[in-house]
Image (tube, rainbow, N blue to C red):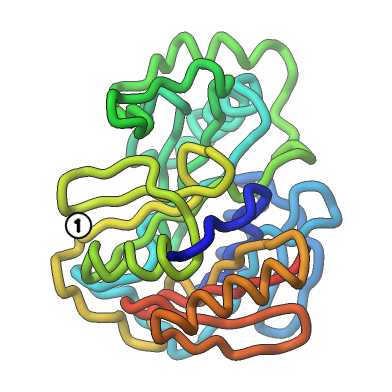
Amino acid sequence: MSKVIHPDAAIGHVHLIVSNLERSTQFYREMIGFQILAAEENTVTLTADGVTPLLVLEERKDAVRKPRGTTGLYHFAILVPDRASLARSLLHLLQKGYPLHGASDHQFSEAVYLADPDGNGIEIYADRPKEEWEKTENGEYKGVTEPLDVNGLLAEAGDIPWAGLPNETRIGHIHLHVADIQEAERFYNHGLGFEATIRMENHALFVSAGGYHHHIGLNTWAGVGAPQPPENAVGLRLFSIVLPNEDELKKVVEQLKNIGVTAEFAEKTALVKDSSGNQIQLKVK
């Protein structure tokens, strides 16, 4: 029986492959509101608070577009601290005329969806207070997708001008295309120790640590048995899960070993892949 992952476990950063570093950096700074934390020849690390790395962009000169019907990134989700911050982000995107893919009310959160210049999916969202999150009779969160009250949200923006992402911003969750939900559940629940919070029949599963609505979303919307994208495709290189201490890291690695997953160890980190090829860095806070 696997042990539940530590309640303080959370998503750390997201590392993306992009085709044009300058273009992507400009987008994530000017449209989304990140700041540059570090820049090298082919990578840029972005932050919201000037200290914490949240997004790494890595350029590949031979990058190709991610083929449809493959596993990998569906979207990564930027969690802003409050509704007013989300309102200012939305207003900024509308004023800039940047195309949005959607805007939804999920009951536990309100969210805006778009894509970066390479087609990588992005969600910007704000949580409702946890005491307002509703549960179903079986104890799962009531995840709905309803139209966002855009006018009601924009009214929260107030007179404070958009000034980029607030310091408290973090990566709230990540949503992945996988080839098989049962295999994904085996890896994320029995291996990593996340708890299932929402199930959508046999095509989607949401899991979390510490009673959050979800840290990781998993779906087969690219097709059951979907192949992995080519190595040089734009998209997700890896995402990190931050654990509170080394004992927790060792526990998770041991659980993964018990289901036949080997972890590549480095100092205070381990690198693993799920059955659909999505790469995860486990690291100590």
Q: In which quarter of the image is residue 139?
A: top left
Q: Which of 278 and 136 is in front in this view?
A: 136
- In the rendered image, the quadrant that contains the C terminus is bottom right
Label 1 sits on a secondary structure element that is loop
Residue pictured at 21% horizontal, 68% vertical? 180
Q: Mark 1 points at which residue?
A: 221
Residue 109 in the image, given as x and y percentages of width and height: 47, 28
* Residue in front for this viewpoint, 228 or 20: 228
Residue 71 screen position, x and y as percent: 29, 71
Which residue is depicted at the point 50% across and 66% down? 192
Q: In the rendering, at what x and y percent does residue 106 appear?
A: 37, 28
The picture places residue 174, in percent across and down from the top left corner, at: 47, 55
Quadrant holding the N terminus: bottom left
Residue 277 picture quarter:
bottom left
User: Extreme front residue here?
Assistant: 1
**Could you tell me if residue 82 is visible in this image?**
yes
> Which residue is depicted at the point 55% across and 86% down?
263
In the depicted view, which residue is nearer to us: 120 or 228?
228
Residue type at tag 1 = Trp
**For the residue carrying disc 1, how many other residues have a C-alpha within 10 Å: few (<14), some (14-19), or many (20+)?**
some
